[in-house]
Image (tube, grey):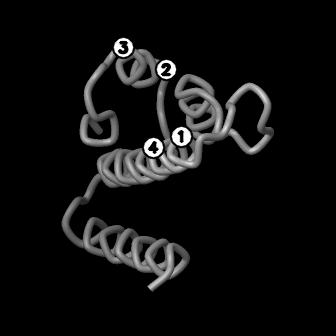
Amino acid sequence: TTLYDKANTITGRIHNVSLWLRAYFESPSTRWNVIRYILASHYVHYWTTKIRNFEWQGRDKNRDPRYPGDFLKLCEELQKKGVLIHAEVETLNAYTGNKHKLL
């Protein structure tokens, strides 16, 4: 299987979770918060994978335009998309452990 196949599988599972949440939680804000955390975790996990792959290949992050960027930049993008709120960005930035598991 390819990374593309895996990404499609994860997308399908997120869709299934959203349908389950719709039936389980009455509050739209609760459903949205759960989905936000799942999406944010998904983004952070793939960002981490890209960084590790970049470093494994020995690329220079200062010279290669394909460098995924730093973690704060990712969090700011997720905040602009409405996936994270400001307090969550600050908490994630300060956390030194495995960030996608914090979500």
Q: Secondary structure at mark 3?
A: helix
Q: CA distance from mark 4 to mark 1?
A: 11 Å
Question: Which residue in the protein does label 1 denote?
Answer: 55
Which quadrant is the N terminus positioned in? bottom left
Q: Which residue is at the far bottom?
A: 1
Image spot of residue 82 (x, y percent): 56, 39
Q: Residue at x 55, y 76 (%)?
A: 4
Q: Secondary structure at mark 4?
A: helix
71 sits left or right of 31 in the view: right
Indicate whether 63 appears above or below 93.
below
Image spot of residue 69 (x, y percent): 65, 32
Question: Which residue in the protein does label 2 denote?
Answer: 86
65 sits left or right of 77 in the view: right
Q: Closest to the observer: 35 or 73?
A: 73
**N-terminal label among 3 and 1:** 1
Residue type at mark 2: give it: His
Residue type at mark 1: give it: Glu
**N-terminal label among 2 and 3:** 2
**N-terminal label among 4 and 1:** 4
Q: Closest to the observer: 23 or 43?
A: 43
